[in-house]
Image: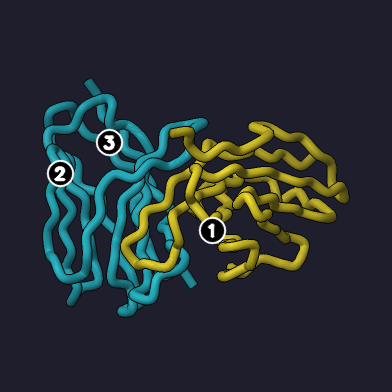
Amino acid sequence: KAGVTQTPRYLIKTRGQQVTLSCSPISGHRSVSWYQQTPGQGLQFLFEYFSETQRNKGNFPGRFSGRQFSNSRSEMNVSTLELGDSALYLCASSLAGTGSNEKLFFGSGTQLSVL
Amino acid sequence: DQQVKQNSPSLSVQEGRISILNCDYTNSMFDYFLWYKKYPAEGPTFLISISSIKDKNEDGRFTVFLNKSAKHLSLHIVPSQPGDSAVYFCAASPNQGGKLIFGQGTELSVKP
């Protein structure tokens, strides 16, 4: 069974640009969550999608958005990039994301550098 | 508001000795706790978990202890091996499910 796949692995952008990251969950998983990892801040929750609907949202500005397609694949978009958006963006999938004991399975992440 | 805190950014241990990683939380609604391990350039992988109805869960060299009254959990690795060198994240889940809340991570270095 293939794991969570994130593309691209690395991205370099300049301030003001926008970027789209992609995530393909494990087959059969319907919940996809996105996290931002920066040094010293751990993993900060961005949002979670289930059946094409955003079900949970973290405390990030509206420049960060996402969507989920009918095949459960998800994309995350960041508009008007800022230097502080440089981070590792991780996608995670789970079966349904509704049980408190569900595990998340992570992809290897997309390393975004904003110059 | 950091609901899950790992106050030690790094820990260095000799091979064969015990590694103890600590985690504190503030939200009493958390009822499921997990530890993830992360190597550079890879995503976090699940290591071990514990439900709030237990105070200890063991899996091979890894044991997680939960002290609900102190809102504190710890991960013990015995014996520590060089391959255990990684960043360890503590995470908590509220009893209604939903998003996992992660701590800042502790970088463990096990020296041969």
User: Which chain is painted in yellow?
Assistant: A
Chain at tag 1 = A
Tag 3, which secondary structure?
strand
Of residues B24 and A57, which is closer to you in this image? A57
Q: Are marks 3 and 2 in contact (CB under 8 Å)?
A: no
| Viewer-closest of A110 and A31 | A31
Chain coloured cyan = B
Chain letter for the residue marked with disc 2 in the picture: B
| Vertical side of B67 occupied by A42: above or below | above
Task: In this rendered view, identify the residue nearer to me: B24 or A100.
Answer: A100
Q: Quadrant of the C terminus of chain B?
A: top left
Give left or right: position of A57 versus A75: left
Dot 3: few (<14), some (14–19), or many (≥20) neighbours within 10 Å? few
Tag 3 subunit: B
Identify residue for label 3.
B12
- Identify the residue shown where x is 29% and y is 44%: B47
Kind of residue indicated by mark 3: Ser
Give the class, few, some or many, for how many residues have Cα within 10 Å of label 2's Cα (few <14, many ≥20). few
Residue drawn 12% across the image and 64% down it? B55
Q: Is residue A46 left or right of residue B21?
A: right
Residues at marks 3 and 2, CA–CA distance in whole angstroms: 22 Å
Looking at the picture, how far across and down is residue A57, in whole percent? 60, 69
Q: Position of residue B66 (x, y in %)?
A: 18, 64
Instruction: Give the residue type at disc 1.
Output: Gln
Which residue is tagged 1? A44
Residue under numbered circle 2: B59
Q: Where B72 sits versus A12, above or below?
A: below
Q: Nearer the viewer, mark 3 or mark 2?
A: 2
Q: Residue at x 19, y 41 (%)?
A: B19
Can you tell which of label 1 and label 3 is closer to the viewer? 1
Render colour scheme: by chain
- Dot 1: few (<14), some (14–19), or many (≥20) neighbours within 10 Å? many
